[in-house]
């Protein structure tokens, strides 16, 4: 239904919205909180020192020129998303052993 349709973006947006509604419902049912995080710049911001460096999509490694932290681009983004989510929920992690 999505492929080749001029309504593809609208269909995908509706699907993500429905998925979010399901997650919200299930979290409430389980007595949990659902935190939504804007993923903008999570691959460009260093998860250790928060320094932002622009990267091409083809760059798969994160190398921070400020603090020297090196990891995969995806792991760096995951650490940033986790920190944003916990911050949004008002939760302070006991330790970040990633």
Image (spheres, rainbow, N blue to C red):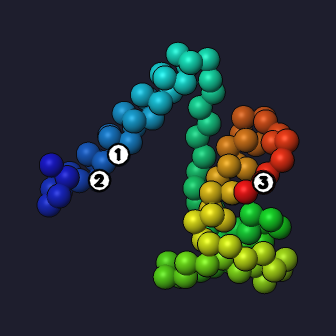
Q: Is residue 76 above or below residue 36?
A: below
Whether the residues at callouts 2 and 1 have beta carbons within 8 Å, the answer is yes
**Labels 3 and 2: the sequence-earlier one:** 2
Q: Is residue 51 above or below residue 29?
A: below
> In this view, which residue lies farthest toward the front?
97
The residue carrying mark 3 is 97
- Label 1 element class: helix
- Label 3 element class: loop
3 vs 2, front mark? 3
Residue 16, image x, y percentages: 38, 42
Q: Is residue 82 visible?
A: yes
Residue 79's label in the rendered image is none
Residue 35, image x, y percentages: 62, 36
Residue 56, image x, y percentages: 53, 82
**Labels 3 and 1: the sequence-earlier one:** 1
Q: Is residue 47 left or right of residue 67?
A: left
Q: Out of 61 and 87, give the one closest to the viewer.
A: 61
Q: Residues within 10 Å of mark 3 (few under 14, many from 20)?
A: few
The residues tagged by marks 3 and 1 sit, at their Cα atoms, a distance apart of: 34 Å
Residue 77, image x, y percentages: 62, 62
Report the residue at 56% width, 18% height from top.
30
Q: Residues within 10 Å of mark 1 (few under 14, many from 20)?
A: few
3 vs 1, front mark? 3
Position of the C terminus, as image quadrant, is bottom right
Report the residue at 78% width, 54% height from top.
97
The residues tagged by marks 2 and 1 sit, at their Cα atoms, a distance apart of: 6 Å
Q: Is residue 72 above or below residue 93?
A: below
The residue carrying mark 2 is 9
Q: Which of the 4 quarters of the picture holds residue 53?
A: bottom right
Residue 13's label in the rendered image is 1
């Amino acid at each position: 239904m999505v492929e080749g349709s001029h309504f593809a973006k609208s269909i995908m947006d509706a699907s993500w919205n429905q998925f979010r509604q399901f997650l919200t419902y299930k979290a409430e049912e389980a007595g949990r909180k659902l935190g939504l995080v804007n993923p903008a710049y999570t691959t460009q911001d260093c998860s250790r020192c928060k320094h932002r460096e622009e990267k091409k999509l083809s760059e798969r490694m994160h190398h921070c020129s400020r603090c020297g932290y090196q990891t995969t681009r995806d792991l760096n983004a995951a650490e940033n998303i986790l920190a944003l989510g916990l911050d949004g929920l008002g939760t302070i992690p006991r330790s970040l052993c990633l």
